[in-house]
Amino acid sequence: MFRIEPKHKPSRWEAIILTISILFIIGVSIIGFDSAPHIPIIISIMVLIIYGMLNGLSFKELQDGMVEGAQAAIGAIFLFFFIGILISSWIIGGTIPTLMDIGLRLVIPHFYYGVIFIITSITGLCIGSSLTTAATIGATFIGISSALDLSLSITAGAVISGAFFGDKMSPLSDTTNLASSIAGVDLFEHIKDMGWTTIPAFIITVVLFALLSPAEAQTNIGQLAKFRYALNETGMVHWYSIIPLIILIFLSIKKVPAIIALATSSVSAIGLSFFHTKNLTLGSLFNVLYSGYVSQTGNQEIDALLTRGGIESMMFTVSLILLALSMGGLLFKLGIIPRLLSQIESRLNSTGSIVTATAITGIMINFLTGEQYLSIILTGETYASQFSKAGLSNRNLSRVLEDAGTVVNPLVPWGVCGTFLTNVLGVPTIQYAPFAFFCLLCPLLTILYGWTGWTIRERA
């Protein structure tokens, strides 16, 4: 059942105490002491290593667990490197400045956050990647909100809500395909069934962001005009700079592998940069792709918004992901997660309890391992037999896997998505999480449906 075979069988209370201790160490360090997540995770890893050695496991076995856990991050790490290149190339190619200019034109003060949510939702549906959506369109809206002196936490919440709506419902999304595959459900039947929880969550989210949007009197329209003027003065706003975005969407629709799509879009942006960038040498270009673009217009706001990107900007994210997944590998090797799953699985006696346990397990694995793919895979494998025994269609299972797996990861400060989003948007997870309404609503709705029986399908 498990990708990493346990080498130890802890007691129920050992598993519970260790889990609570790790969550306490990480939670107090991040929230109470404003620590970077790396340090409490390293402390937690050391606690687990000591526990394992005291129970007869060799350091080699524990090290193997960490390595096996970290291996799950390799695909994501390559993707993050290419996203870092994409961001810097989209800046020098004028794509991000042009998107900012378009976004400023679309600003509707009394529905501002709602517009952000809807635009990122549409983009996410087209691209099928929440992280790419947030790093490009999302970062653009963060810049606009900064220029208008509006809440960056609410803006990030709107961006992430929209990006993960798109990721969850797009047939191009890897998590959508993974959930349907694990549950053995047709992809489009899976998407159709997710609509029962996703559409109400979408509508409620739009209403909430509309209510939170500033009144027109609160929006500095004069500052908006000045910012647009300064942005256009950079000489980076051009109609042709939208071409890299069109290429990315087209390749995504054609189901071209993500890394190839990102690389092709980046190359097109680099090519366009030679039309409007003076004295651009190959050496300076390589430096931008690695270290990120450094804006030197003299306008502090513009320079702050356009100085970003590059492979180097992903290193914080990469190091944290490797540590978090190494800790997850130890939790499996020590048998802690398998023990907790067996305890939950043994107490299921109704549809409501099965759906709730599945959702809680998906959330728990997200928080313990920081990885949404593991959340979907392990939860699906663990509860497939329970849905079958209860006479429930696997369409219910695949929906819960997304409602409590895919959309929860951005709410985990040390998770793959949470770390990445904090890095590219510049807003800490604990600040945007209360405003990621879509991500918060989906697990609640799926549990509610489980207990009421609404939209729960029986096996044919």
Image (spheres, grey):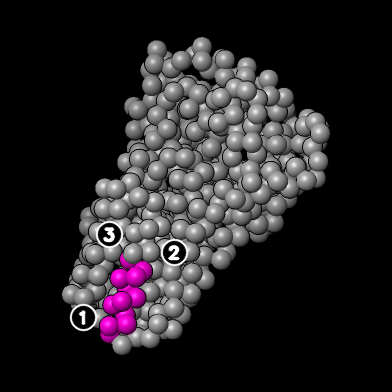
Residue 206 in the image, given as x and y percentages of width and height: 39, 34
- What kind of element bears circle 3? helix
Point out the frontmost of discs 3 and 1: 3
Work out whether residue 248 can be spotted. Answer: no
- The quadrant the N terminus occupies is bottom left
Q: Residue at x 51, y 11 (%)?
A: 222
- What kind of element bears circle 1? loop
Q: Nearer the viewer, residue 223 or 118?
A: 223
Q: CA distance from mark 3 to mark 2?
A: 15 Å
- Left/right placement of residue 114 relative to residue 253 reads left
What's the mark number on residue 357? none
Point out the frontmost of discs 1 and 2: 2
- The quadrant the C terminus occupies is bottom left
Q: State which tag comes first along the sequence, 1 or 2.
A: 1
What's the mark number on residue 11? 1
Q: Residue at x 38, y 25 (%)?
A: 213
The range drawn in magenta is 44-55
- In the image, residue 423 above or below residue 307: below
Residue 14 in the image, given as x and y percentages of width and height: 21, 76
- Left/right placement of residue 33 relative to residue 268 reads left
Q: What residue would you read off at disc 3?
A: 25
Q: State which tag comes first along the sequence, 3 or 2.
A: 3
Q: Residue at x 34, y 76 (%)?
A: 49
Q: What residue would you read off at disc 2?
A: 323
- What kind of element bears circle 2? helix
Q: Nearer the viewer, residue 262 or 36?
A: 36
Q: What amino acid is labelled 1 in the image?
A: Ser
Residue 54 falls within the magenta-colored stretch:
yes
User: Circle 2: is it few (<14), some (14-19), or many (20+) Cα within 10 Å?
Assistant: many
Q: How many marks?
A: 3
User: Circle 1: is it few (<14), some (14-19), or many (20+) Cα within 10 Å?
Assistant: few
Residue 402 in the image, given as x and y percentages of width and height: 41, 57
